[in-house]
Image (cartoon, rainbow, N blue to C red):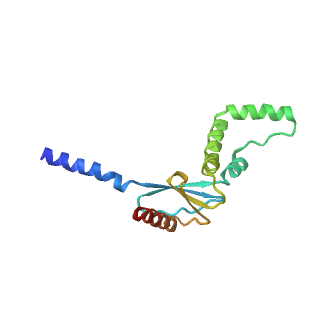
Amino acid sequence: MYLANKCILLMVLIAAPAFAQERIEMFTESPANVGSVNAVEVIHYDLSEPSRLKKRLAPKLPADEKLALIKAKQFFTSEEGKAYQIAMRDAYRGRQKMMQYQLKKIPAIVFDDGKYVIYGSTDVAQATMLYRQHIESIREQ
């Protein structure tokens, strides 16, 4: 029985890479309803998020430059200010990825860390189908 369990576990471990989860990155300029596809992780980057965070979370600074500097220093050393910095860093991650992938326009759906891009769509299911067809056509060649 013990040996049979080991063989089953070994078979599962060997077969696992064949069913590896795909990762898709979707870039938009507004919040979007991200669909789902079986065995696919979808990461959505809303490029408008930094401006929304600034409006919602950034402190209102006085017009006086010296007072504004004092208020800004107080904010950025506070727990609220630290949370704001983390949120802004996370919000800008999409722009960093967009530059890394050298995307030409938005919306875009990215596969294989930028090797394959579908522009003009936010339909994850359709994009995944097109991507898989493309990969299959390459394998057949």
Residue pictured at 19% horizontal, 48% vertical: 7
User: Quarter of the image containing the C terminus?
Assistant: bottom left
Residue at 74 percent across and 31 percent down: it is 73
Compared with 91, 70 (above or below) is: above
Q: Residue 64, how many percent across, how many down?
A: 87, 36
Picture coordinates of residue 62, whole percent (x, y): 83, 39
62 or 134: which is nearer to us? 134
The image shows a total of numbered marks equal to 0
Q: Is residue 131 above or below residue 46?
A: below
Residue at left offset 59%, top offset 53%: 45
Measuring from the top left, give residue 36's x and y in whole percent. 47, 62
Given the current orientation, which residue lies at the most extreme right position?
A: 64
Residue 74: where, in percent of width, then height?
Answer: 73, 31
Q: Quadrant of residue 70?
A: top right
Q: Quadrant of residue 29?
A: bottom right
Left or right: 11, with 138 as reference point: left
**Please, which residue is most extreme toward the front here?**
141
Comparing 57 with 10, the one in front is: 10
Q: Compare residues 40 and 80 and report the one nearer the observer.
A: 40
Vertical side of 68 occupied by 109: above or below: below
Residue at position x 66%, y 52% from top?
A: 49
Residue closest to the far left: 1
Give 120 or 75, whichever is nearer the viewer. Answer: 120
